[in-house]
Image (tube, grey):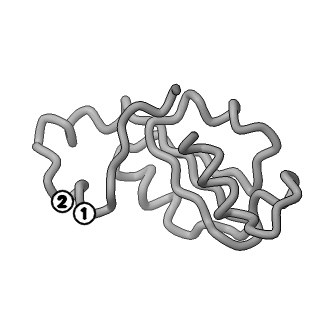
Amino acid sequence: MWFTKKYKIEDIQHLSRALLQDREKYRIAIIDDQNFTLIKSIEQHGFDITHFFDVENISDLKRYDIIISDIQGVGKKFGSEYEGGYLIKEIRE
């Protein structure tokens, strides 16, 4: 399994200053079929972020440390009625 560490949103509140200083080292993938308006703001804070409108291959996400996915409108290419939910399940596996 290439996703070895899992975090919850509330974990971000507990990051130390040392980790925040290294934020450019963490690659973030946003999967959302619509424009993600906060990308510029996140980039201005020093994060390396990439926006995907959808993904065709789960392995394309291997190089990302943090993956944020929409639930509806993404993952359609996998043919599941659960769309983003299915995509998240596949990423976790």
What amino acid type is highlighted by mark number 1?
Glu
Q: Left or right: where does residue 42 sit relative to residue 81?
A: left
Q: Say whether marks 2 and 1 touch (CB < 8 Å).
A: yes
- The picture places residue 27, in percent across and down from the top left corner, at 47, 36
Q: What residue is pinned by disc 1? A: 10
The residue tagged with tag 2: helix, strand or loop?
A: helix
- The picture places residue 45, in percent across and down from the top left corner, at 34, 51
- Residue at the spot 40% in from the left edge and 52% down from the top edge: 44
- The picture places residue 41, in percent across and down from the top left corner, at 43, 61
- Mark 2 vs mark 1, foreground winner is 1
Residue 33 figure quarter: bottom right
- Residue at the spot 40% in from the left edge and 44% down from the top edge: 47
Q: Left or right: where does residue 70 sit relative to residue 64?
A: right
User: Which residue is nearer to you in this view: 49 or 56?
Assistant: 56
What amino acid type is highlighted by mark number 2?
Gln
- Residue at the spot 16% in from the left edge and 47% down from the top edge: 15
- Residue at the spot 71% in from the left edge and 73% down from the top edge: 72
- The picture places residue 2, in percent across and down from the top left corner, at 51, 26
Give above or below for 24 relative to 69: above
In this figure, what is the number of numbered marks? 2
Q: Residues within 10 Å of mark 2 (few under 14, many from 20)?
A: few
Q: What residue is pinned by disc 2? A: 13
